[in-house]
Image (spheres, rainbow, N blue to C red):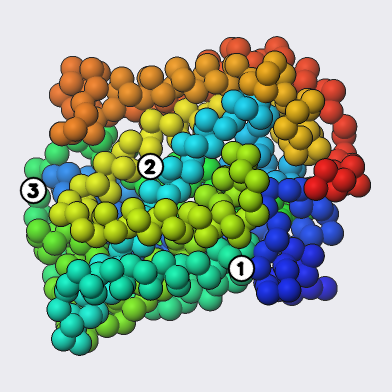
Amino acid sequence: MKEVFEIPIAEAGPSGIERRGIDYVPSRERWAKPVNLFWMWGGAIFNVEILVYGAILMTFGLSFAQAVFIIIVGNLSYALLGLTSLQGPEAGTTTFTINRASFGPHGSKLIAVFNWLTQVGFETEGLALVVIAGLALSSKVGLHSSTGLKVGLILLAALIQLLLPLLGHAAILKAMRVLVIPFIILFVIFAFLAVGHVNVHSVRHGANWQTMLEGLAFIISASGLGWTENGNDYSRYLPRHTSGKATVGWVFLGTFIPSVLLMTLGAAVATFVGSDSGSITGIATHFSPWFIWPYLIVAIVQLFAINSLDLYSSGVTLQALGLKISRWQAVILDTVIVTGLTSYAIFSASFNTLLSEFILFIIVWVAPWTAVYLVDWLLRGRRYSAIDLQRTKGSLYYRKNGIHWPGVIAQILGMVAAMLTLDAYPHYVSVVSNATNGADFSIFAGLIVSGVTYWLLARGTVPAEAQRQQAEPDETAIASLA
């Protein structure tokens, strides 16, 4: 029996680069197990980036107790990631190819653009944090920050970042499992050094309920909701009849536990680092001088790893958009774009502001899309026609002119509802948020409005549509489309 972290020969080229993009994964290549997703997501989430999110949360003016409550509740949203990992084994393809069932081949492209922009945003954030950490290490050896040094580190980081996404799915899973242990060790040391400094009463009275809702929106977006569009890109290598409970359970455990621990530690450290809250380098400088070296080195490696998930997903999303390029070419194209955006972020004086506002604004499209995607899956009895997902014309999902209007209408209404209830002060405050003194209902409004709308519009047609598809995928016919 093949070792579970060996890159399957069928999906890897002579250089070890994964050839498979959004095309159907045949049963002979379904080598993964649900527990592999536990290690992959655990390796991704045990990351200094998640620590920074916890520290940023404290800048909302919350008490430590309020922050911990929001962290626990907000990270329950990783159940959504588990649920949006259940379609890949059935459909055998990536998220935004499966998305053709909900929106039609052409209607899906608009949502795929939103996803691509989101993935690129997270890639830029991760690469910028790598460069910031590299600049901190450079200063420790006497190299002063300069334009030349920043440019050099940006280019070096971009080249290194190419490696895992180019190698592909199996290599990413293997790397994530290896990286879990060193970061757990670093986490334990960090927690030990911090425990004597934590001031849980640094903010005695805390914030009002409106600010708590805004903080909850930030955490939900940075945790489970912000990853829902990636889930099936990795679960598609699970056998078709894999246990759904096992898949959801392993994904949830691999994400919820490390995220709660790291965000809580980040919030705790923020109680005594003051103005350095939310800074990847500022946090570490408040500890023993020897600690910053292992901290930043491990942080850089982990940031490269978590960025690999976004870069892999953004590559297959470009293919789902219809670009006639291979997966590895899409990865290179994305890397070039992200390198330019990272340069802007590094030379900007407001990186943390850009980060928090970006995370809040992705709510506007992700929450409605997640609702439509899951409601559609349930309406069609959790079944897909794999061959029709691979076709762009003349398929079961083509409908009228390649657009499934119930999905598009539900998405638009959900986005409008989210915008009407979003608080992204100071740049944007919605009508409802302004009337409620800063409350942010955008996630809940987006989910409910789009989910209910889609159910009302599609409850008659989608179940009937699902009845017309084959019970089992014809892998020979699907392979002929490649």
Q: Report the amino acid beneath label 2.
A: Ser
475 lies left or right of 289: right
Q: Which residue is mark 1?
A: 167
Q: Secondary structure at mark 2?
A: helix
Q: Which one is in front, 382 or 204?
A: 382
Q: Residue at x 66, y 29 (%)?
A: 105
Mark 3 or mark 1, earlier in chain = 1
- Distance from disc 3 to disc 1, alpha carbons, whole Å, reads 50 Å
User: Do the residues under discs 3 and 2 have CB atoms within 8 angstroms?
Assistant: no
- Distance from disc 3 to disc 2, alpha carbons, whole Å, reads 27 Å
- Other-residue count near label 3 (Cα within 10 Å), few / some / many at <14 / 14–19 / ≥20: few
Give the vertical position of 209 relative to 153 (above or below). above
Q: Which one is in front, 373 or 67?
A: 373
Q: Residue at x 9, y 50 (%)?
A: 203
Q: Secondary structure at mark 1?
A: helix
- Other-residue count near label 1 (Cα within 10 Å), few / some / many at <14 / 14–19 / ≥20: many
